[in-house]
Image (cartoon, rainbow, N blue to C red):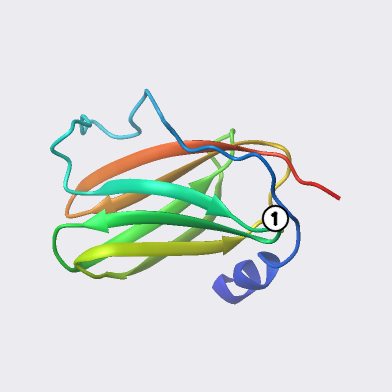
Amino acid sequence: MRILLTILFIGFSICATSAQQDSIPKTGNKKNANDPLVFRSIKNTPDLIFIEYTLPFEGIVEFELRNEEEEVIWKSQFVGKTGDNQIKFSTKPLTTGKYYYSLYYKGRETRKYFDYRPTN
């Protein structure tokens, strides 16, 4: 299934995305300026989205991308290094709408969203 999801991520283009702080945390963890996980930016190319983040220490990170209905579009777990990191995924399975992305690190969640609109 993971291979199928990875294959599905090659395709669409993206325009005018912006990362914004989600005001309602998915879990009971409150967000504040002292959170160890810091999203720095979201960038895009015609086919890919790059999410940049910083970790204070190497550790296991789980990434989730959800649509407006809170359905998981993509989920992955990996080891993040100390300092700057980047997650890259294709825009192919995305349709116009709002998407939430979360990183889980050492029991904490940081969640944001972006608005997506494919271009032809």
Residue drawn where x is 36% and y is 24% of the image: 24
Q: Position of residue 103 (x, y in %)?
A: 34, 51
State the residue lying farthest toward the right: 120
Front residue of 26/20: it is: 20
Q: Position of residue 106 (x, y in %)?
A: 17, 55
- Name which residue type carries label 1: Pro
Crowdedness of circle 1 by 10 Å Cα count: few (<14), some, many (20+)? some
Name the side, left or right, on which 112 lies relative to 29: right
SS for tag 1? Answer: loop
Residue drawn where x is 49% and y is 37% of the image: 113
- The residue identified by callout 1 is 93
State the residue lying farthest toward the top: 23
Residue drawn where x is 56% and y is 62% of the image: 89
Name the side, left or right, on which 96 lies relative to 108: right
Q: Quadrant of residue 35?
A: top left
Question: 28 above or below 105?
Answer: above
Q: Quadrant of residue 27?
A: top left
Name the side, left or right, on which 95 lies relative to 85: right
Count of numbered marks: 1
Q: Quadrant of the N terminus?
A: bottom right
Question: 75 above or below 68?
Answer: below
Question: 102 above or below 90?
Answer: above
Q: Position of residue 30 (x, y in %)?
A: 21, 29
Residue drawn where x is 33% and y is 30% of the image: 25
